[in-house]
Image: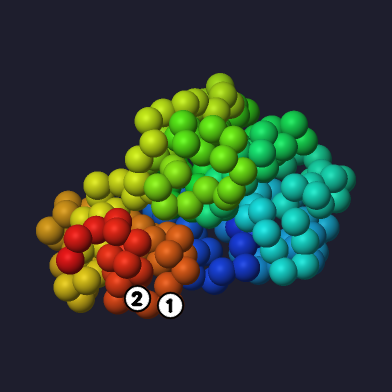
Amino acid sequence: MSLTGPRFLLVDDHALFRMGLSLMLTERWPHAMLTQAGTWAQALAHLQAQAVDLVLLDIHLPDGHGLADLPVLRELAPQARVLLMSSDADPAQIAQARDVGIDGFVPKSAQAADIVAAVQAVLRGEQAYAALSYAALGGHGGHGGPGSVTSPGWAPDGVLQVQEAGVAFSDLQLALLRHLGKGTPNKAIARQMGMSESAVRAEVSWITEWLQATSRREAYERAVERGLIVP
């Protein structure tokens, strides 16, 4: 690990999500070296030029797949740890991730505290796999989504824990969504909820990404349409 801080590589094709994740990581590790890549090719080019401590990797990329193409990453950066992040909580893919040696998995809907805890564990050399709901582990054959993942939590021993099925968003995230519906600015949300403004921005970015919305208002409207919150 770098003497100044961990070296992170964020690999995701959604710029909004990368921005939110970057804000969260730099708040916790202000001296970290952080690089973003929107494609698999960009990620590999960076790994050829610069060593990293942790790759935060999306499963699906425009020009590659985080699981199928992992051997190439390992060849370029054998010492780097890998934390998989995805809005798709498919138990089969998560089990495959463990089998091929990925160090952890966190859904994109996770709270900032859950992501930080998982990153800390992986940097310590541990595994950190999100705790999935019973519904997600029950072999229903479909991909995860709202209603199939609990407010994640994570398992430091790498075990996919079985929990009661629940909504995909935590109470904090639901409260944020209500503020988005009112058009409340981030600074006001931070003050009212006792959060830092950067933490609010990160949470809003993750919520927007999970709901595949292009604006704060659209994220709120999609949450209402899916029955996640009552207007």
Farthest-out residue, left: 192
Instruction: Say which residue label 2 marks.
Output: 218
Q: Taking 215 as reference, is 67 left or right?
A: right
Image coords of residue 230 (percent x, y): 19, 60
- Name which residue type carries label 1: Thr
Q: Taking 168 as reference, is 32 left or right?
A: right
Q: Taking 212 as reference, is 48 left or right?
A: right
Residue at 69%, 63% (x, y): give it. 61
Depicted 40 relative to depicted 102: above or below: below
Q: Are marks 1 and 2 in contact (CB under 8 Å)?
A: yes
Instruction: Say which residue label 1 marks.
Output: 214
Image coords of residue 19 (percent x, y): 48, 66
Rounded to the nearest angstrom, the CA distance separating label 1 from label 2 is 7 Å
Q: Is residue 2 in view?
A: no
Residue at 44%, 43% (x, y): give it. 149
Image coords of residue 135 (percent x, y): 47, 36
Secondary structure under tag 2 reads helix
- Name which residue type carries label 2: Glu
